[in-house]
Each structure stands twice: as C-alpha cells, then as structure tokens.
Image (tube, grey):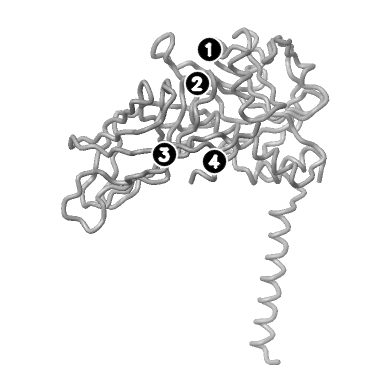
C-alpha cells in the first residue's frame, strides 16, 4: 500500500474508476486495478517506477501488452531481479494475469518504468491483447519526504 | 497430581521458556543474525572521487564514522531507490531506539557517465540531509569496487538508454575506513535494526 512507501515522496494515485474494462456478464468486475503507487520522479531524473496490483476475476488469462500515459513520454514494463547477489533489470514485452489470480507489480519485482514525466498527472492506460483498455483516472496527492 | 498432569506441566513450562528465549533472541539479540561479518576487515584502497559538492572523496572520507555504502545509479527506478529508502528507514528506527551510533548513508554511482555530482547530490538529498553521494572517473570507481568485491556492468541498448547490472549488497564501513560487514539482498529492515547496534558496539 502507498502508506508503506514512506518516507519517499510519492504521487499517491487513487483509482477513481477502478474498472472501465468491458464487463460482460460478471457479478464482479473482470479486472480490477488496486494498490497503485507511482514514485515521484526525483528532481532532474527522467525515470520513475510505478506499482499496481491487477486482479483477474475471469476464467481466462488476460495479457497486458503495453501501458501509456499523456503524462509520461513512455512507459515500459520491467522486471527487477537479484540473481546471485547481482541486481538486474530487463524489459518485458507483455504480462499475463492468469485466470482467477492477482498479479503484483511491486518493489524489487515486476514494475512499470515511467520515463520523462511531463509535469501533470491525469491518466494511465493499460492496454490489453484483446484491444481493450483499462483507463485509470488518477487523483494526485503528495506525501511529504524526509527532507 | 498424576503423571499426565506432570508431563503437561513440563511441556508447557518448556514451551513458555523456549518462547521467552526466542523472543529475546529476535528482539534484543547480542549477535548479528543476518549480516556477513568480515573476520579480518578490509582496508579501503587508495582512490580519488568526488562528492555532491565536488569535494574530494578518498579513503580518509570514511574515517571517523560508520557508513552504509550502496553502489547504484540514479537512472535505476526500482532497486536503488528502494534500497536507499530502506536504509533511510533504518536510520529513523535506530534514532527512535536511541542508538548512540547512526551510520551515514553513502551512494557510490556505478554510472558516472550520467551521474554528475549535482545530479547524484539531488538524488541522495531526497533520502536525507547528511547522505554522501560519490561519483567520479570510472577508473577510480573501479579501484574502489574491485577492492570491495563489487560487480557492475553496463547493459548496452544505446549510448543514452542503458541499464547497469550491479551488486545489490550494502557494505558497512567502520570508522577505521575498513569494510567490516556486508548485508545481502533482500534488504529487510529488521535485519539492519537488529544487527547494526551489535556490530557498531551499541548493544
């Protein structure tokens, strides 16, 4: 959760519409995005990280193919690993959220790499293989840093 | 009291005693449980780098206080800020626990091509006022990393967009400017809060 990320300054993002994905006939939303946090881009730096939990309530896997936002020049899906004591990061082409499962994009693991913040923060689009998208409308707030 | 009751009493007593022992061991241990203690501390080599104010950084810069040293780079969006945040929280926790010794946090860049003293200074400033940022010529950085067993390697995409694989360990440098202990990833707050006071002689 965002509160555990203190004291690093964050844009804390509240999902106004946690689900805009086409719903079909489900009792619950087929895909839910929650626990969203984007580290505030540090002054002078062009990269930041985003974290999110995606819950697939359907009986089929869902493939996230790319993420974009008018507020960042580009957003890539990355994975951090520590292999034999060596920290590595690699780009991932797509992510599968397996049927009935949750996928955590979290610190030290799979995450969004956001490049060149343009200054505002409004929406992030999660684009899926099916051609549909999950549009996250974001409300910003600022968590005080340590300095 | 029959034998059954006596046996139950013994078992209960043993369980409670074990619990108390283990609780004491975890919460107020006098032993470092996670850090790798270097039996014969390794002296820092001769090197010449720069801090965020463009002032020289040498082995002597590390004399007189304990330092938690991490090797990373500012274009690292995940592991580096996460590690530095953990170290910042460690200092807060030690302060709350009224530890006599608070280590300084040091980030040594393994990406001097992009990490100028100014950029690195702003970066470490996000994690606290008294942190030390170290960068400089790559040959001088290699003098330091090779002496301390730190690995790093650029993963080339192009000249501007690249990542750097690097050792994830946090090194503890003692006031004699010697490597005295090493914390491996994952960097868990509890490991530092338990081990640092023991190693630094506060417990």
| Horizontal and vertical percent position of residue B111 | 54, 15
- Discs 3 and 4 lie in a common subunit: yes
B66 over B13 or under it: above or below: above
State how far apart marks 2 and 4 are (Cα): 19 Å
Distance Cα–Cα, label 1 vs label 3: 32 Å
Label 3 secondary element: strand
Q: Are marks 2 and 1 on the same chain?
A: yes
- Same chain for labels 1 and 4? Say yes or no: no
Q: Earlier in the sequence, mark 3 or mark 4?
A: 4
The disc label shown at residue B75, or none: 2
What residue sits right under mark 1 in the picture? B114
Identify the mark at residue A139; answer none if there is no mark: 3
Q: Quadrant of residue A121?
A: top left
For the residues bearing labels 2 and 1, Cβ distance under 8 angstroms: yes
Q: Chain of mark 4?
A: A
Distance from the alpha carbon under mark 2 to that under mark 3: 26 Å
């Amino acid at each position: 959760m965002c509160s555990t990320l203190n004291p690093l300054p964050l844009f804390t993002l509240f999902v106004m519409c946690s689900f805009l994905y086409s719903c079909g006939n489900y009792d619950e939303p087929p895909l839910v995005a929650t626990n969203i946090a984007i580290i505030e881009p540090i002054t002078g730096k062009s990269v930041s990280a985003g974290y999110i939990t995606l819950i697939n309530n359907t009986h089929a896997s869902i493939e996230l193919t790319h993420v974009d936002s008018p507020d960042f020049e580009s957003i890539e899906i990355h994975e951090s690993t520590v292999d034999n004591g060596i920290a590595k990061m690699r780009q991932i082409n797509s992510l599968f959220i397996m049927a009935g499962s949750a996928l955590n994009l979290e610190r030290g693991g799979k995450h969004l790499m956001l490049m060149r913040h343009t200054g505002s923060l409004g929406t992030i689009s999660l684009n899926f293989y099916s051609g549909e998208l999950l549009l996250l409308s974001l409300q910003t707030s600022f968590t005080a840093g340590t300095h | 009291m029959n034998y059954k009751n006596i046996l139950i009493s013994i078992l209960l007593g043993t369980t409670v005693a074990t619990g108390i022992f283990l609780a004491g061991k975890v919460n107020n241990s006098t032993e470092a449980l996670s850090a790798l203690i270097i039996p014969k501390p390794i002296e820092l080599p001769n090197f010449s780098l720069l801090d965020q104010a463009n002032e020289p950084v040498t082995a002597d810069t590390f004399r007189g206080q304990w330092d938690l040293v991490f090797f990373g780079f500012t274009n690292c969006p995940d592991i580096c800020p996460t590690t530095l945040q953990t170290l910042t929280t460690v200092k807060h926790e030690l302060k709350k626990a009224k530890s006599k010794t608070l280590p300084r946090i040091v980030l040594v860049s393994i990406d001097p091509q992009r990490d100028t003293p100014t950029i690195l200074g702003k970066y470490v400033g996000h994690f606290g006022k008294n942190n030390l940022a170290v960068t400089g010529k790559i040959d001088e950085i290699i003098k330091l990393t090779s002496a301390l067993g730190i690995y790093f390697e650029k993963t080339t995409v192009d000249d501007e967009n690249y990542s750097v694989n690097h050792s994830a360990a946090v090194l503890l440098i003692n006031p004699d400017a010697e490597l005295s202990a090493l914390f491996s990833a994952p960097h868990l707050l509890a490991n530092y809060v338990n081990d640092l006071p023991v190693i630094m002689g506060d417990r």
